[in-house]
Image (cartoon, grey):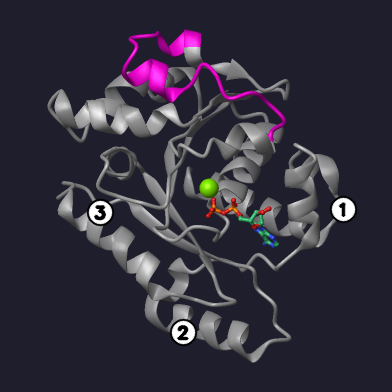
Amino acid sequence: MVITIANQKGGVGKTTTAVTLAHGLALKNHKVLLVDLDPQGHCATLLGMGEEPGVFDLLVNDRSLREVTRFTGRPALWLIPSNKKTATAQVSLVLEGYRHTILLEALAPAVNGRVHYTILDTAPSAGGGLQENALYMANLIIIPSAVDYLSLDGIAKVLKTLNALHRPKPPVLWIVPTFYDEVTRESRANLAMLRDRFGDRVKRPIHRATALREAAAAGRTIFEYAPDSRAAEEYAALVWEVLNAGR
Ligand SMILES: Nc1ncnc2c1ncn2[C@@H]1O[C@H](COP(=O)(O)OP(=O)(O)O)[C@@H](O)[C@H]1O
Ligand SMILES: [Mg+2]
């Protein structure tokens, strides 16, 4: 199963969701490959790892999937990191004749058997080709959406990019509200608006949690840093949803 995490807005919890979901599934004994497609390379940072070799080397330097796939030190969890060179990879893809399937071809051995879940974390921008590739190969698309300042714009842009791909079989789409704080009227109103518009595709919200920020700074996932926290429990619930969706 391929899960793509996307939102054309930055700072909405994409990378946090990608890394946490990946580790959560691995903790349930599923083999998981996390692929970072954002030149910022934060997946490696959040896991306390270095950034090279990365997805650039796979797509442009003809390095093999095995060569760029790094063990995270956590059972059943592997990472293909990203770094600034990924932006160059996008340019090369366009120059060499762009297709929606370049990433799928490069990751095929993993997707078609070596791992159970491939999780793709994307950059907050489309047009370079990598996000399109990631949306094209997804069985499930998760759009984290910050409800503290909700902009439906980021969600709309992902949907627009997705529609332009003309996929024969549309993927399942979920919205995960993030930075939720029920004390604020804004949070409650924005969550209600999302539910109104997207119905049961809106999953349980992830509260704003300092522990998530601290875990990131420590290079550990929330399941390592604060396994008893509400944030860990909320992300564990998302892991369960994914496990059930895959059946
Ligand atoms: N639910 C949350 N509560 C508080 N801070 C969060 C939460 N989710 C993410 N963060 C923090 O917000 C910042 C942006 O999150 P990140 O996952 O990198 O977003 P994106 O990948 O969409 O840019 C990071 O510092 C991260 O640790
Ligand atoms: Mg990110």
Front label number (3 vs 1): 3
Which of 42 and 66 lies nearest the eye of the viewer?
42
Provide the secondary structure element on which disc 1 rests: loop
Q: In the image, what residue type sits under mark 3?
A: Leu
Residue 108 visible in this rendered orientation of the protein: no
Q: Earlier in the sequence, mark 3 or mark 1?
A: 3
- In the visual, does 52 lie left or right of 8? right
Find the residue positioned furthest to the bottom.
185
Instruction: Give the quadrant of residue 8.
Output: bottom left
Q: In the image, what residue type sits under mark 1?
A: Asp
**Which residue bears the numbered disc 1?**
228
Instruction: Name the quarter where the N terminus is drawn.
Output: top left
Q: Which x, y percent locates residue 110?
A: 43, 20
**Which residue bears the numbered disc 2?**
193
Residue at (48, 9) in percent of width and height: 66
Ligand 1 is within 8 Å of the C-beta of the residue at disc 2: no
- Taking the magenta stretch, the answer to whether it contains residue 228 is no
Q: Earlier in the sequence, mark 3 or mark 2?
A: 3
Q: How far apart, in angstroms, are the residues tagged by discs 2 and 1?
A: 30 Å
How many residues crowd mark 1 within 10 Å: few (<14), some (14–19), many (20+)? few
Ligand 1 shown in quarter: bottom right
Q: How far apart, in angstroms, are the residues tagged by discs 3 and 1?
A: 37 Å
Q: How far apart, in angstroms, are the residues tagged by discs 3 and 2?
A: 22 Å
Whether residue 209 is situated above or below residue 108 in the rendered picture: below
Residue at (65, 44) in percent of width and height: 20
Provide the secondary structure element on which disc 2 rests: helix
Which of 19 and 25 lies nearest the eye of the viewer?
19
- Taking the magenta stretch, the answer to whether it contains residue 55 is yes
Residue 94 visible in this rendered orientation of the protein: yes
